[in-house]
Image: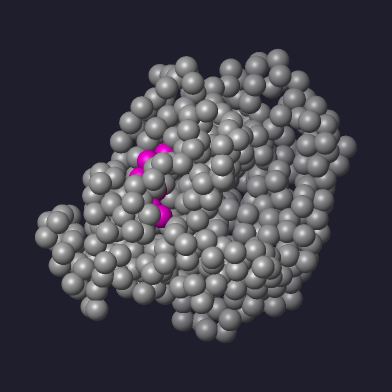
Amino acid sequence: MHNQAAIDELITTLGQRVSQSKSDLELHGRSETHFPDAPPEAVIYPESTEEVAQILRICHAHRCPVVGWGTGTSLEGHALALNGGVTVDFTRMNKVLDIRADDMDVRVQPGVTREALNHELRATGLFFPVDPGANASLGGMASTRASGTTSVRYGTMRDHVLALEVVTATGQIMRTGSRARKTSAGYDLTGLFVGSEGTLGLITELTLRLHGQPEAISAAICGFDTVEDAVGTTMDAIQMGLAMARIELLDEASVRAVNAYAGSNIPVKPHLLLEFHGSDTMVRETSELFGELAEARGGSGFDWASKPEDRSALWAMRHNAFYAILGLMPGATSMVTDVCVPISRLAETIEETQRDFAAHDVTGPILGHVGDGNFHAVLLMHPDDSAARARAHDAAHRLVERALDKGGTATGEHGIGMGKLRYMEREHGHGWAVMGQIKQALDPLGILNPGKMVPPSNL
């Protein structure tokens, strides 16, 4: 409790919105996956940018660590308070501030979730497309540079954040970017904070790019004999310029899990889940062309879904795949990891990974965003099985090394957090040291999310 002086001053400032209750501390000390609990010493619930600035000024004066919290859905331990201190929970900063339909942009507070935003946008004919699966907060999604199932068509959070309001470690309020769709004015500070995982500042407001609701949407599921055939079909479609909104891969193990969880009877082999957006004519023609490409590589069992309720059921199956996979081993915990490789190396990377898992007795179904070379592995283990945990850790390490060997990245969308810190030097070389210098310039005392992102000497 060496940060109690800072916490006492915060209580004087914010009263009951500073919590030290056991339940709050435990909730904010947990991870979605395998990391051990690391609770903060207090949880703070600000309601305005100025309150966030007050929090950071107090914490900076006392050298008290500060960790931002959205909905807690991150997978690499991003929001764990490794050095104690306080967690700033943004759930009360959850207002949609300004919808500008003519300019197709929106201004929101960081605690707004993606589903809540799209609910607010229903009457405008616009929508926000970035879909990581979980109903994550938009501030958290920006902080981790999230992407998801729609990135093959619409891009990632990097492509959708036009401007930010950020509070720095010293409590200074700063705005980056503008509502203009392009600029040549200075450093891209917005891009710097998107993906910084709360290590450079706390995001208190976002201006986001929106898209028009498509006239027609069609979705489908299609099976293949091999992962190579499924990925090959995807490459064929991308090279032909087919406008796919989503194209997701489930391997055999993932299909088996989904069948058991949802009571479905999908043939147990690799499958692609697809969605096309556009005009009625475009969607029909694109669907037909994709069908021809898939048939040429042995694709079969096309099941098309044009009704909204059928599409919702299809994507609910994909979004619930994590929970379905957990059901393969009742009582198990998981290590969820992701990598991204050039799409030409995707099939071989997945097949090598599957062979590696089998050779080392690791249960690890694979699924992912095949359209951009990003895939996930959910490695299962019983909490009290230390040998299984060691095998899973080793297999995850080999997977990342394999991806880096093929010109890929240690993480396509989960981020670094504490789980992928060890790979930063190999992936970025001297660039990692430069990140540390940026961190030092913006957070000289190292109070913002310590233990994450930058070299240890800068923590």
| Residue depicted at x 18% and y 72% | 5
Choose top left, top right, bottom left or bottom right for residue 420: bottom right
Number of numbered discs present? Answer: 0
| Residue depicted at x 57% and y 84% | 387
> Which residue in the rendered view is the most extreme toward the right?
296
The residue lying toward the viewer, choosing from 310 and 18, is: 18
The residue lying toward the viewer, choosing from 208 and 270, is: 208
Q: Is residue 240 magenta-colored?
A: no
The residue lying toward the viewer, choosing from 167 and 108, is: 167
Q: Is residue 94 left or right of residue 396?
A: left
Task: Magenta stretch: give its range.
Answer: 201-206
Choose top left, top right, bottom left or bottom right for residue 47: top left
From the viewer's perspective, is residue 105 above or below residue 167? above
Residue 86: x %, y % from top left: 29, 65
The residue lying toward the viewer, choosing from 206 and 126, is: 206
From the viewer's perspective, is residue 300 above or below residue 270? above
